[in-house]
């Protein structure tokens, strides 16, 4: 424990420490081991992990992180100090070893990560220069979000929902093979969702990409109770990681160093004597150095830090997880926690100097996501123009040809798909790029160096593709819309982060194939077009664009357009069945830019306007137009290709995005396309996707035909019938609305 409780005058403290309430007069061995920082402008990492000064200064860094974490959270009586505190030595060790490209699976570790960015001066880029500044802007607008955001200078990636951070670490490992990507993982969320299976599948597919390093903070507790693995013994936990492909597992247990006679399997190292605190830190620093070296040299490795949750802050166990209104800077538990962790001013200077030089400089100037990653020029993609009105073509197959060309021109390109490209009429991608698999087999187009990544869960598919995009690479996630929901949380997290990034990065692009209308025989288990409601809501973010190309020509230019954008989430929905070709490539490009296109128009005694999202959903609409023509009623069929363009500029938070796109359809153009005697919106998914249409339309007589629910059927037409979306129903409703 800190031995000094004498506090010095405030006018003696360094300027950046303004806002720190308590300072110790001295610490044990400060004169001998803390006389000068071990890192400098010419030394970015500890050379010898067993060096006594290095161990000592790593321990100081851990306590500085703990102090700041508690200080800033208590300043707002809000936030989560306990989880990060249990692994403060591990984070400090990584920094001191020069490995500063650190991500996390735990959004609740945010205040600890912010503290690290403060210590290395990265937060000065957002005007946070003192602890007072940090306290004022924690959990405030335009400040330090309650959960990690990639918008914070120096932080690589966001963290909110559990089970995401490992994908960022693996994405970084792929794109930057010479760098280490540590990722902290909490035992409270260890199995949610699929963390370990994602590691194992990645290692099977990319056995050489071992330059990521999971750090499990095994502290015995979750948010409000014991963690589900709290009763495991050390051998079981070690075996668990080894069973998932980790060759080297370093478990450092604080209890092995305890001289304070603490009860239970999980203990607090800050209660040890200074000698034993040094011993614990030394063991962890050595294990970290060894694990990092092996991870960078082809051996999958992991570190497990077993230490009580809340070590060194205001409380321990689950009670340390969250601060509430009664936790203030004046409450006794917080005051005593801060006083126990108090450091002398020169210790703060020492820690800051080390952190500012670790890894070659402040994280805001060194970590990989602070820079645009150079990309190979794709040149002009080989688009194939099919003649409108002639032979039907399969949209997804046409799309696959472009994907193949992208992968051949960009060796780092990755496509992910859980259900298989061949099942979506995109076998041409597998033939060109090869499914990545340890077993070579030409019959299945698979081999160990392929660019098509096919783990059988959507979380891993979406996670790697979205992570690669965020970290500066090109990637594509393909999914049946019926299953994609399992992967959407990380895709949503990444697109939100892209809206905040301070530089350009390739878009997070996904294609949804084999839609509900094509899945009749499989029944409702494979019919989940409700997923489009998710994207309909996200359009208002300002950087999310669901695209509904109407045919095999337009799907090609949709992907070409997506590849030329940046910092957007782009969703392309296309069928795997042969469908009519209705547009030229030039018309497709204009439709995507404008938002919609007239596909057919006829005159009559009055006019019914059909506004349609999707390709297969057009089939009954064209039939309905024929039925109405027989009654002398004119129609206009408009394909809504890019519904985001149909909103009013005030509907969407586009101007808050770092790469703002403020293009919206004008009132004049909107009325030209959609005005008529009757307006009928049609979508193969939920009515929510038609919101911008219905918000802006001045046509008083209007209706919507949309998906209700699935059923087992033999054909798409039967699903249209079941959902009352067939041609006759549309024509009858149009006549009824006309009066």
Image (cartoon, grey):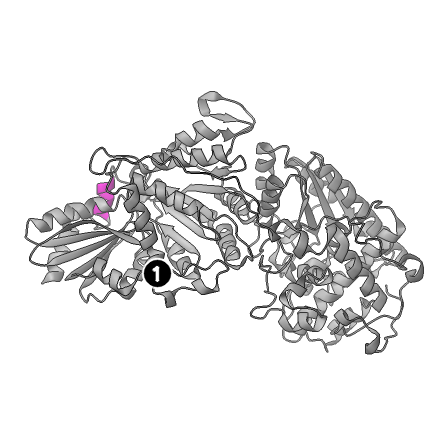
The front one of 512 and 187 is: 512
Assess whether residue 635 is covered by the magenta stretch. Answer: no
In the rendered structure, which segment of residues is drawn in magenta? 716-722
Residue 59: tell me if it is visible: yes
* Left or right for 711, reference 424: left
Q: Taking the image as drawn, is residue 306 in sight?
A: no
Instruction: Name which residue lies at 33% across and 34% down.
Output: 384
- The x and y percentages for residue 400 are 39, 35
Residue at which label 1 appears: 664
Quarter of the C terminus within the rendering: bottom left
Q: Where is residue 718 in the image (x, y as percent from the top left)?
A: 22, 42
Compared with 403, 364 (above or below) is below
Most foreground residue, 458 or 290: 290
Q: Which of 585 and 622 is in front in this view?
A: 585
Judge the density around disc 1: few (<14), some (14-19), many (≥20) Cα neighbours within 10 Å. some
- The picture quadrant where one finds residue 112 is bottom right
Q: Is residue 513 above or below residue 129?
A: above
Residue 73, given in percent of the width and then of the height, sits at: 67, 69
Q: Which of 433 and 662 is in front in this view?
A: 662
Residue at the farthest top position: 442
Query: What residue do we see at 71% from left, 56% from top?
Result: 362
On the rendered structure, is 593 left or right of 241?
A: left
- Determine the main secondary structure of the stretch shown in magenta: helix
**Which quadrant of the figure has residue 117?**
bottom right
From the image, which quarter does the N terminus lie in? bottom right
């Amino acid at each position: 424990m800190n031995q000094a409780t004498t506090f010095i005058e405030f006018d003696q403290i360094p300027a950046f420490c303004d806002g720190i309430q308590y300072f110790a007069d001295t610490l044990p061995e400060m004169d001998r081991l803390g006389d000068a920082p071990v890192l400098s402008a010419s030394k970015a990492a500890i050379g010898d992990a067993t060096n006594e000064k290095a161990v000592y200064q790593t321990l100081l860094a851990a306590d500085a992180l703990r102090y700041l974490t508690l200080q800033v959270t208590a300043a707002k009586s809000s936030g989560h100090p306990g989880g990060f505190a249990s692994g403060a030595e591990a984070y400090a060790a990584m920094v001191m070893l020069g490995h500063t490209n650190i991500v996390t699976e735990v959004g609740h570790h945010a205040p600890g990560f912010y503290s690290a960015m403060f210590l290395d001066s990265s937060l000065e880029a957002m005007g946070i220069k003192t602890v007072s500044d940090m306290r004022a802007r924690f959990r405030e607008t335009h400040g330090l979000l309650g959960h990690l955001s990639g918008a914070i200078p120096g932080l690589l990636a966001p963290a909110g929902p559990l089970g995401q951070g490992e994908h960022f670490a693996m994405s970084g490992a792929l794109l930057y093979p010479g760098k280490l990507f540590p990722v902290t993982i909490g035992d409270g969320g260890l199995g949610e969702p699929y963390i370990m299976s994602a590691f194992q599948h990645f290692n099977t597919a990319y056995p050489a990409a071992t330059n990521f390093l999971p750090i499990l903070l095994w502290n015995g507790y979750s948010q409000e109770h014991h963690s589900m693995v709290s009763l495991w013994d050390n051998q079981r936990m070690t075996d668990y990681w080894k069973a998932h492909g980790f060759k080297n597992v370093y478990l450092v247990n604080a209890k092995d160093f305890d001289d304070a006679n603490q009860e239970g399997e999980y203990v607090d190292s800050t209660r040890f004597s200074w000698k034993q605190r040094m011993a614990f830190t030394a063991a962890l620093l050595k294990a970290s150095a060894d694990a990092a070296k092996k991870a960078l040299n082809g051996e999958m490795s992991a570190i497990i830090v077993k230490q009580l949750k809340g070590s060194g802050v205001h409380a321990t166990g689950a009670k340390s997880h969250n601060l509430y209104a009664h936790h203030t800077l004046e409450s006794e538990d917080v005051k005593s926690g801060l006083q126990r962790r108090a450091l002398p001013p020169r210790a703060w200077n020492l820690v800051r100097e080390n952190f500012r030089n670790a890894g070659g400089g402040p994280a805001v100037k060194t970590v990989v996501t602070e820079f645009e990653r150079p990309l190979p020029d794709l040149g002009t993609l080989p688009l194939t123009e099919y003649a409108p009105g002639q032979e039907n073509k399969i949209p997804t197959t046409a799309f696959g040809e472009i994907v193949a060309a992208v992968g051949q021109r960009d060796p780092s390109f990755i496509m992910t798909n859980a259900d298989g490209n061949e099942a979506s009429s995109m076998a041409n991608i597998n033939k060109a790029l090869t499914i990545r698999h340890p077993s070579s087999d030409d019959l299945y187009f698979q081999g160990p160096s392929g660019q098509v990544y096919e783990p059988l869960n959507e979380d891993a598919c979406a996670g790697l593709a979205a992570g690669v995009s965020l970290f500066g690479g090109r990637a594509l996630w393909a999914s049946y819309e019926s299953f994609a929901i399992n992967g959407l949380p990380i895709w949503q997290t990444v697109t939100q982060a892209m809206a905040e990034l301070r530089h350009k990065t390739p878009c997070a692009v996904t294609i949804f194939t084999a839609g509900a209308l094509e899945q009749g025989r499989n029944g409702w288990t494979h019919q989940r077009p409700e997923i489009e409601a998710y994207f309909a809501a996200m359009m208002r973010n300002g950087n999310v664009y669901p695209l509904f190309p109407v045919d095999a020509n337009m799907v090609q230019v949709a992907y070409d357009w997506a590849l030329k954008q940046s910092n957007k989430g782009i969703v392309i929905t296309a069928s795997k069945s042969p469908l009519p070709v209705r547009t030229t490539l030039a018309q497709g490009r204009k439709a995507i830019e404008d938002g919609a296109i007239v596909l057919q128009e006829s005159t009559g005694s009055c006019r019914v306007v059909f506004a349609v999202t999707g390709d297969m959903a057009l089939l009954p609409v064209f039939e309905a137009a024929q039925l109405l023509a027989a009654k002398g009623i004119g129609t206009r069929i408009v394909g809504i290709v890019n519904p985001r363009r149909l909103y009013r500029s005030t509907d969407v938070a586009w101007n808050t995005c770092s790469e703002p796109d403020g293009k919206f359809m004008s009132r004049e153009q909107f009325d030209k396309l959609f005005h008529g005697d009757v307006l009928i919106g049609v979508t193969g998914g939920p009515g929510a996707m038609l919101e911008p249409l219905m918000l802006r339309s001045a046509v008083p007589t209007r209706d919507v035909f949309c998906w209700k629910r699935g059923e087992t059927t033999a054909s798409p037409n039967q699903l249209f019938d079941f959902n009352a979306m067939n041609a006759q129903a549309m024509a009858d409703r149009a006549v009824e609305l006309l009066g």
